[in-house]
Amino acid sequence: MATESPATRRVQVAEHPRLLKLKEMFNSKFGSIPKFYVRAPGRVNIIGEHIDYCGYSVLPMAVEQDVLIAVEPVKTYTLQLANTNPLYPDLSTSANNIQIDKTKPLWHNYFLCGLKGIQEHFGVSNLTGMNCLVDGNIPPSSGLSSSSALVCCAGLVTLTVLGRNLSKVELAEICAKSERYIGTEGGGMDQSISFLAEEGTAKLIEFSPLRATDVKLPSGAVFVIANSCVEMNKAATSHFNIRVMECRLAAKLLAKYKSLQWDKVLRLEEVQAKLGISLEEMLLVTEDALHPEPYNPEEICRCLGISLEELRTQILSPNTQDVLIFKLYQRAKHVYSEAARVLQFKKICEEAPENMVQLLGELMNQSHMSCRDMYECSCPELDQLVDICRKFGAQGSRLTGAGWGGCTVSIVPADKLPSFLENVHKAYYHRSDGSLAPEKQSLFATKPGGGALVLLEA
């Protein structure tokens, strides 16, 4: 799998209504027909939230919703980028002088991240132009990774236009790095599952080196995604990057406490690896080394024996230099306990005990509680939605994705699915004040989908 390239598949466009509509829109926009199409799926993270950038394994699956791009290489050096959704404005720019404005998380910047990542990987300075029409059906800002799917799709588009080859793992790693051009310090889960996903199985994704292992989900249950209708754009807010820095600082303080070379440590997983102890023992070390009260920058400097200037310029990211308090104890406790829950989840799936759906549900409930109380990445609407899902038959329910809005994922016994969907819809979406926009309302059962691929017209 590590060396395998994304698949190329021939399709009869006329037999796929969405592809056919995209082809017709492309023709009316550019006056020509696409040479090929690229698809990259969104994902739902079943368990393992906010731990990929700390070096720990996560357990996502690809969903059926995806980003689809119709592409025609052209002889000019201009990139013409359009979207089937009229809310997203067109872009026309040089394909060889890519500027990404971090201050504005505009939709086309995610495409430019993927293009620039592949371009720089191969050192290409004369990339041919292309006409691209993007169509996505992943709800935006919902925690299902619409932005990373667009980055991955654009990376695969650029690779295909260049006529080069890369493995799925190489593509995932390049796209994970290149999404940081937009200012989000993500960990690589979203891009990895977008390329490495296979139909019918979730994946345990491990990092350094990147690898994916099949995890067979219980046959007697389904996973249901519900959108809270609260949008959170992690590139537009500081919550996400502050959490990344809090984990980095916690790792450094834990390393210092244990007399390790703390200045070389960036991730919480590195502290555990260097100490050679279990996740449960890391939780005990955290109890000893860190206090629950928030740390201010001065105290962090005292603990590490550095100046405020060194903290700001050598450790903090530019967009976290003015943060006044850091909750290190809570963030480390969440990461180490969540990393342990991921491994327990995989073990239960492998052993398949009689009460496996109940056990998996309990782990998902614990995960939500930790995200809410220790990582503080939930919101009142997500908490309410989780409670409603549990009330109407979910064995477990939790926020998924970065949080602060977006979706929940619930594990529901298959025989309870119809009543579950009906009751949750009534309880959450049918509000008397009509406050939830109908176009954002989505509640659906999903099964593991396949990864990114190139489609050619047969």
Image (cartoon, rainbow, N blue to C red):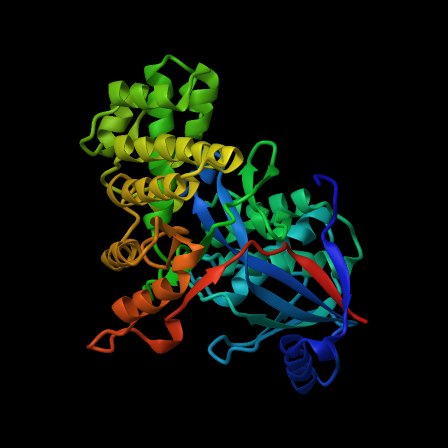
- Residue 190 in the image: state x and y as whole percent: 52, 49
Q: Quadrant of the N terminus?
A: top right
At 56% from the left edge and 76% from the top edge, which residue is drawn?
A: 90
| Nearer to me, 324 or 257 | 257
At 70% from the left edge and 39% from the top edge, which residue is drawn?
A: 2
Q: Is residue 374 above or below residue 340?
A: below
Direction from residue 177 to residue 45 in the image, left or right: left
- Residue 439 in the image: state x and y as whole percent: 39, 76
- Residue 67 in the image: state x and y as whole percent: 58, 65
At 41% from the left edge and 15% from the top edge, which residue is drawn?
A: 260
Q: Is residue 99 shown to the viewer in this render?
A: no
Q: Is residue 436 above or below residue 226?
A: below
At 72% from the left edge and 85% from the top edge, which residue is drawn?
A: 31
| Nearer to me, 37 or 436 | 436
Direction from residue 282 to residue 16 in the image, left or right: right
Q: Is residue 228 shown to the viewer in this render?
A: yes
Q: Quadrant of the C terminus?
A: bottom right
Picture mark count: 0
- Residue 63 in the image: state x and y as whole percent: 53, 58
